[in-house]
Image (cartoon, rainbow, N blue to C red):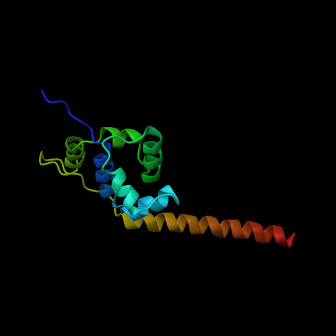
């Protein structure tokens, strides 16, 4: 049985692409010492220094283990849970826009209440 070799650089690239983050944007997140070419070289490394891997994971807002253990099979299994042909399909039971409006209205009411309290204190 062939041993499954984990290529952390390739995993990093796949995760970055799934998240829709360009190499330039990741370089900016990592700081002034980074640029697109350096990210490209990093993605070619089979193994990434643990401290650097932690820094990159933090910039991508993913756990370091996600980069260490990412596999196409795991990603496919995750994605297929949302596109399952077994009769169960995930459908949102509410309109997300309605939730945004609801939250905005609650925030607006809270701000109005806060302004009334401040005006009351200012008059005193």
Q: Residue at x 58, y 69 (%)?
A: 108
Does residue 95 sit above or below 86 in this rendering? Answer: below
**Image coordinates for residue 10, horizontal then vertical, percent:** 28, 48
View extreme (top): residue: 1
Q: Residue at x 37, y 38 (%)?
A: 65
**Image coordinates for residue 120, horizontal then vertical, percent:** 79, 69
Q: Residue at x 38, y 56 (%)?
A: 39
**Which sits in the foreground, 85 or 45?**
45
Left or right: 84 in relation to 75: left
Left or right: 112 in relation to 31: right
**Which sits in the foreground, 95 or 57?**
57
Does residue 103 sit above or below 82 in this rendering? Answer: below
Q: Residue at x 28, y 52 (%)?
A: 14
Q: Quadrant of the C terminus?
A: bottom right
Q: Quadrant of the N terminus?
A: top left
Does residue 30 sit above or below 109 in this rendering? Answer: above
Q: Is residue 93 visible?
A: no
**Image coordinates for residue 111, horizontal then vertical, percent:** 64, 67
**Which sits in the foreground, 21 or 85?**
21
Does residue 41 sit above or below 112 in this rendering? Answer: above
**Image coordinates for residue 61, horizontal then vertical, percent:** 44, 50
**Which sits in the foreground, 98 or 56?**
56
Q: Is residue 80 visible?
A: yes
Q: Count the marks.
A: 0
């Amino acid at each position: 049985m062939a041993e499954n070799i984990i290529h952390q650089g390739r995993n990093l690239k796949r995760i970055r692409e799934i998240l829709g983050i360009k190499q330039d944007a990741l370089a900016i997140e990592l700081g002034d010492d980074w640029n697109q070419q350096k990210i490209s070289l990093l993605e070619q490394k089979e193994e990434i220094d643990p401290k650097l891997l932690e820094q990159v994971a933090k910039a991508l807002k993913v756990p370091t283990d996600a980069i260490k253990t990412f596999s196409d099979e795991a990603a496919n299994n995750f994605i297929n849970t949302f596109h399952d042909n077994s009769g169960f399909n995930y459908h949102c039971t509410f309109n997300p826009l309605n939730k945004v409006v609801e939250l905005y209205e609650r925030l607006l009411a809270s701000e109005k209440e806060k302004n009334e309290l401040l005006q009351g204190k200012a008059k005193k």
